[in-house]
């Protein structure tokens, strides 16, 4: 399967100033497959170390941090001659060996020409738990579920990918029915690699849902294994409440809908755990869309989204028959699937390390913009519409109030430009970066 993140890894490899790389992402988003594929295609050989249940390797890192001694041990373990340029060294499940994480600092300081990549499950939680790690001596890369473009490629829609690659906006519109058909599939199947792989082989929606449910069950099992006993119920309650919270007209997260009498203080640690392990994305409200965006966030008002639209559809018990009625599917749960999809697309757009929020004002006229993000010195609003109905009272209020240089509306409608308002179809949102660079 094609993963856009491979291009980022190639860029990392070719930099003269690269540091050891740590890949962070939720369980089962394809971290191990990605890095093995990268090693297979870009290096002569790979020295792969799995630390889970590997006492021998844990002992190797328990002594001094003599990098040459450790390298020799890695060669013996992997039966690979490690070359500083031609070998990729992979540390998998690195959270199982904290000293291996610490060693990355010494590898960078003493033998920076070697190529190290580390991955691990629940790594965000692990690093936040007070574990010493080499600040300033490593780089980080987030990996997310497969986006819509990657899904198209996986299911063999190479012609549609070609149109997106070449920015053939007129032809994209001509074949919008095919794009929308695939987008309906994606709303159901999502971007978890195992689900996409099996679906690409037989287009079996029932099997896709079965695998999604297995993934969801594995997440719940993680709660029991890794969350402090006192917080397990709270984490589970928060997690289970997200679909119903997104199904509301006002998608602001409300603790009292998790449990009667619940407060932010009661659940703040549980929420932080879900965020740091990559299972949910938090989007804070801003009262003023100004630079820097994070300086205007109201941490008491936020929305929570899952990592994957397919998992959201599974948790929401979306019936596969909804795929037969496209309009119904896009309206399902008051547009929550569309908003989830847009956030996922924004998260994986290359070169856009964006701070994403949403905007809402107060009386006299209540208005809300689904997403705003900072790009260079601009704050760009995105209004998400779950159908071709483009009435956008909130966007009009926002434009009159803040006079943005560019506004984006994303729906199932066609490409269109009216003044500085751009209609970008949901299925082409992955091209947002190109559009923004052209306009700005």
Image (cartoon, rainbow, N blue to C red):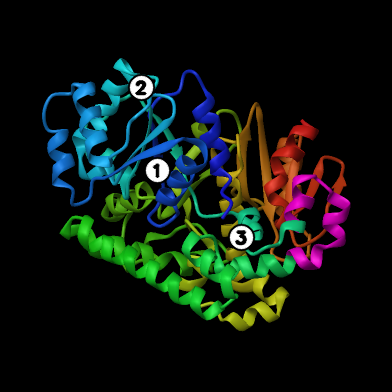
Place of residue 327 in the rendered image (x, y in percent of width and height, measured from the top left): 72, 74
Residue 52 or 358: which is nearer the viewer? 52
Label 2: how many Cα within 10 Å (few below 14, some 14–19, many 20+) = few
Residue lying at 31% horizontally and 50% vertically, measured from the top left: 273
Q: CA distance from mark 1 to mark 2?
A: 16 Å
- Between residue 290 and residue 377, name the one nearer to us: 377
Q: Which residue is mark 1?
A: 24
Quarter holding residue 211 = bottom left
Are the two marked residues, 1 and 2, in contact with CB atoms closer than 8 angstroms?
no
**Which range is magenta?**
160-179
Q: Position of residue 330 (x, y in %)?
A: 67, 69
Answer whether residue 293 is visible to the viewer in this image: no
- Give yes or no for contact between labels 1 and 3 (Cβ–Cβ under 8 Å): no
Label drawn at residue 154: 3
Determine whether the residue tagged by mark 1 lies in a helix, strand or loop.
Answer: strand
Q: Considering the numbered disc 2 on the image, is that residue within a helix, a strand or a loop?
A: loop
N-terminal-most mark, 3 or 2: 2
49 over 64 or under it: above or below: below
Q: Position of residue 78 (x, y in %)?
A: 28, 41
Up/down of 199 relative to 93, above or below: below
User: What is the CA distance from the residue labelled 3 to the residue labelled 2?
Assistant: 36 Å
The front one of 422 and 391 is 422
Q: Which mark is residue 136?
A: 2
Element class at badge 3: helix
State left or right for residue 361 relative to residue 64. right
At x 12% / y 33%, what residue is drawn?
Answer: 62
Image quarter where the C terminus lies is top right
| Dot 1 or dot 3, earlier in sequence | 1
Nearer to the camera, 40 or 111 = 40
Q: Residue furthest top?
A: 110
Up-down: is 241 above or below 142? below
């Amino acid at each position: 399967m094609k993963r856009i993140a491979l291009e980022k890894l190639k860029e990392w490899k070719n930099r003269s100033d690269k540091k050891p790389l740590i890949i962070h992402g939720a369980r089962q988003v394809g971290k191990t497959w990605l890095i093995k594929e990268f090693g297979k295609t870009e290096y002569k050989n790979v020295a792969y170390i799995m630390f889970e249940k590997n006492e021998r390797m844990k002992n190797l890192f328990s002594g001094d941090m003599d990098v040459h001694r450790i390298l020799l041990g890695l060669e013996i373990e992997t039966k690979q001659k490690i070359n500083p340029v031609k070998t990729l060294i992979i540390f998998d499940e690195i959270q199982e060996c904290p000293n291996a994480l610490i060693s990355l600092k010494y590898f960078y300081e003493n033998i920076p020409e070697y190529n190290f990549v580390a991955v691990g499950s629940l790594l965000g939680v692990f690093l936040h738990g007070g574990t010493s790690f080499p600040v300033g001596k490593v780089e980080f890369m987030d990996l997310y579920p497969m986006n819509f473009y990657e899904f198209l490629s996986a299911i063999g829609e190479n012609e549609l990918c070609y149109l997106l690659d070449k920015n053939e906006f007129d032809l994209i519109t001509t074949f919008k029915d095919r794009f929308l058909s695939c987008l309906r599939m994606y709303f159901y199947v999502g971007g978890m690699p195992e689900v996409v792989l099996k679906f690409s082989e037989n287009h079996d929606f029932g099997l896709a849902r079965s695998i999604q449910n297995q993934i969801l069950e594995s997440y719940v099992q993680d709660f029991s294994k890794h969350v402090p006993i006192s917080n397990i119920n709270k984490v589970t309650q928060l997690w289970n409440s997200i679909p119903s919270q997104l199904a509301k007209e006002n998608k602001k997260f409300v603790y009292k809908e998790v449990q009667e009498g619940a407060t932010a203080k009661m659940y703040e640690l549980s929420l932080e755990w879900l965020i740091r392990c990559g299972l949910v994305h938090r989007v804070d409200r801003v009262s003023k869309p100004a630079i820097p965006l994070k300086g205007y966030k109201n941490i008491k008002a936020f929305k929570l989204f899952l990592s994957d639209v397919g998992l959201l559809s599974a948790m929401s018990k979306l019936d596969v028959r909804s795929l037969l009625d496209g309009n119904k599917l896009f309206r399902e749960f008051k547009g929550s699937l569309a908003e989830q999809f847009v956030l996922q697309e924004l998260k994986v757009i290359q070169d856009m390390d964006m701070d994403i929020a949403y905007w809402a004002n107060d009386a006299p006229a209540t208005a809300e913009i689904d997403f705003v993000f900072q790009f260079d010195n601009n704050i760009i609003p995105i209004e998400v519409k779950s159908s071709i109905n483009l009435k956008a009272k909130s966007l009009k209020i926002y434009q009159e109030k803040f006079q943005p240089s560019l506004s984006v509306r994303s729906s199932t409608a066609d490409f269109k430009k009216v003044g500085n308002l751009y209609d970008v179809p949901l299925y082409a949102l992955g091209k947002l970066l190109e559009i923004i660079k052209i306009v700005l």
